[in-house]
Image (cartoon, rainbow, N blue to C red):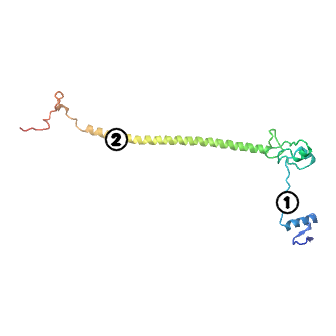
């Protein structure tokens, strides 16, 4: 195993793992300072570029910023972006101008909204039904309480009626209707 050592570092990099000595030195410098160059300076690439930049193979910020891009302004040409999906930047479009993936997501979200609305309506109907049942229950409890009162009253009336029928009828013959004075001789004895 052939390996080389850079001055001032303890890191040994085997040559088999690197493509050239230059890459090995760059790798050593990255590890020496504790940095990963690729993570900090990741190249940003526009997913959609205008026709002017595409022809000259220049970097285009047409998608990321408002058009026109700097290259088209410098050249004095119109900055035209190719047809693309406005939500995900993909170039595969259908007849509506939306890519199939976004369309399926959109229809999925519409289905969710439709299901949510249907569930909301069902909940509203159930809540109304519960309210009606509560009102009916309250009415039935009031009727039941009144029925108990009527039954108690009926029992009392029946008892009073039974007592009235069990008593012998009063003798109303002793009252002289014409005179207006009752005959009290039956009840009292007079001594003279």
Q: Residue at x 62, y 41 (%)?
A: 121
Secondary structure type for disc 2: helix
Q: Which mark is residue 155?
A: 2
As helix, strand or loop, the secondary structure at mark 1 comes to: helix
Mark 1–mark 2 contact, CB under 8 Å?
no
Sequence-wise, the earlier of marks 1 and 2 is 1
Whether residue 1 is visible here, answered yes or no, is no
Q: In this rendered view, identify the residue nearer to me: 98 or 146.
A: 98
Residue furthest top as drawn: 178
Name the residue: 49% across, 40% down. Answer: 136
What's the residue at 54%, 43% (across, down)? 130
Quarter of the figure with the C terminus: top left
In front: 68, or 115?
68
Q: Quadrant of residue 33?
A: bottom right
Question: What residue would you read off at disc 1?
Answer: 38
The answer to whether residue 75 shows anywhere in this view is: yes
The CA span between labels 1 and 2 is: 98 Å
Mark 1 is surrounded, within 10 Å at the Cα level, by few (under 14), some (14 to 19) or many (20 or more) other residues, namely few
């Amino acid at each position: 195993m052939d390996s080389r050592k850079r001055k001032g570092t303890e890191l040994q990099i085997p040559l088999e793992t690197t493509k050239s000595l230059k890459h090995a030195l760059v790798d050593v410098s990255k590890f020496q300072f504790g940095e990963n160059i690729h993570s900090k300076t990741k190249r940003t690439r526009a997913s959609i570029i205008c026709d002017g930049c595409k022809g000259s193979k220049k970097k285009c910020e047409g998608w990321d910023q408002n058009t026109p891009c700097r290259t088209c302004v410098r050249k004095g040409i119109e900055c035209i972006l190719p047809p693309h999906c406005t939500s995900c930047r993909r170039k595969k479009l259908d007849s509506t101008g939306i890519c199939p993936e976004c369309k399926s997501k959109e229809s999925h979200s519409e289905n969710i909204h439709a299901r949510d609305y249907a569930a909301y309506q069902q909940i509203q109907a159930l809540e109304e039904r519960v309210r009606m049942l509560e009102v009916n229950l309250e009415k039935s409890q009031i009727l039941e309480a009144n029925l108990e009162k009527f039954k108690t009253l009926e029992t009392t009336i029946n008892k009073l009626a039974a007592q009235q029928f069990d008593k012998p009828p009063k003798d109303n013959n002793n009252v002289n209707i014409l005179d207006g004075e009752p005959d009290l001789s039956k009840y009292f004895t007079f001594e003279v």
